[in-house]
Amino acid sequence: MSIIAIITARGGSKRIPRKNIKEFMGKPMLSYAIQSAIDSKVFDEVMVSTDDGEIAEIARNYGAKIPFMRSEKTSNDFATTADVLSEVLNEYKNSGKIFDEFCCIYPCVPFLNGEILKDAYNKLSSSNADSLMPVVKYSFPIQRAVIKNKNGFLEYREPENAQKRSQDLEPTYHDAGMFYFVKTSSFSEYHSVVTKNTMLYEIDESVAQDIDTIDDWKMAEMKYRILNNV
């Protein structure tokens, strides 16, 4: 079985300019994703898909491969992650390289490490799942969420669950937004990292952090200092 890590890192970033290579705790943000993939020792190849020359240079400096640049079609705001992954897999296929599995890793994952990737891959390999998604459990049961009604007042979204005990409600999760392991054949069928048989890989919310705004960035720095005693 052959497997590739595909790190998606285009140049455009509206809310945090140059986010993917902005310095985070002394290193370019992208370097954490690359180092995690390399440290896991899971992958036959670690590559970065980018349309940006500076990102490509930094990626190479940290050990990733850039066998080709991302096309204009997959570099705009409307291209999906699945579009980018399809392009990468097809480019490799055209050059004679076919991978049985891949892992899509997002570029802003400073809390990811090789052990997490290795453990997730081992769990996928020992299952009958087609793909794996890291998830974080909601700390409050979403079945008891409230909304503002048409009169502007509060009401329960699911009134039948309003009086139920939290422990009696089914646990719910959300995408951690870090990485996805996928069997290539299943991806080709569904054109998605979420397939018919996707397994959950639960991680602690302390190592999951969306980084879309400057406030998110500051929160991530604070969490990093606490987790790493720096």
Image (cartoon, rainbow, N blue to C red):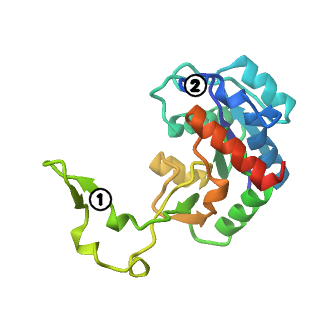
Give the labeled residue for mark 2: 13
Q: Residue furthest front?
A: 153
Q: Residue at x 44, y 80 (%)?
A: 167
Residue at position x 54%, y 26% in the image: 15
Indicate whether 108 appears above or below 176: above
Q: What secondary structure is marked by label 2?
A: loop
Q: Which residue was labeled with disc 1?
A: 146
> Is 141 or 230 nearer to us in this picture?
230
Q: Label 1's element?
A: strand
Name the residue type under label 2: Ser
Task: Report the side of 221 relative to 216 (left or right).
Answer: right
Q: Earlier in the sequence, mark 1 or mark 2?
A: 2
- Residue 140, above or below 28: below
**Of the residues tagged 1 and 2, which is closer to the observer?**
1
* Residue 155 sits in quarter: bottom left
Residue 21 appears left or right of 162: right
> Visible in this render: residue 60?
yes
Give the distance between the C-alpha atoms of the residues marked 1 and 2, in whole angstroms.
33 Å
Q: Residue at 41% across / 75% down in the picture?
A: 170
Identify residue type, mark 1. Answer: Val
Query: With respect to residue 205, does 223 lie above or below?
Result: above
For the question of whether residue 5 can be seen, the reply is: no
Q: What is the quadrant of residue 110 in the picture? A: top right
- Nearest the viewer among 175 and 145 is 145
Q: Quadrant of the N terminus?
A: bottom right
x then y, percent, for residue 51 = 64, 21
What residue do we see at 80% from left, 23% from top?
A: 57
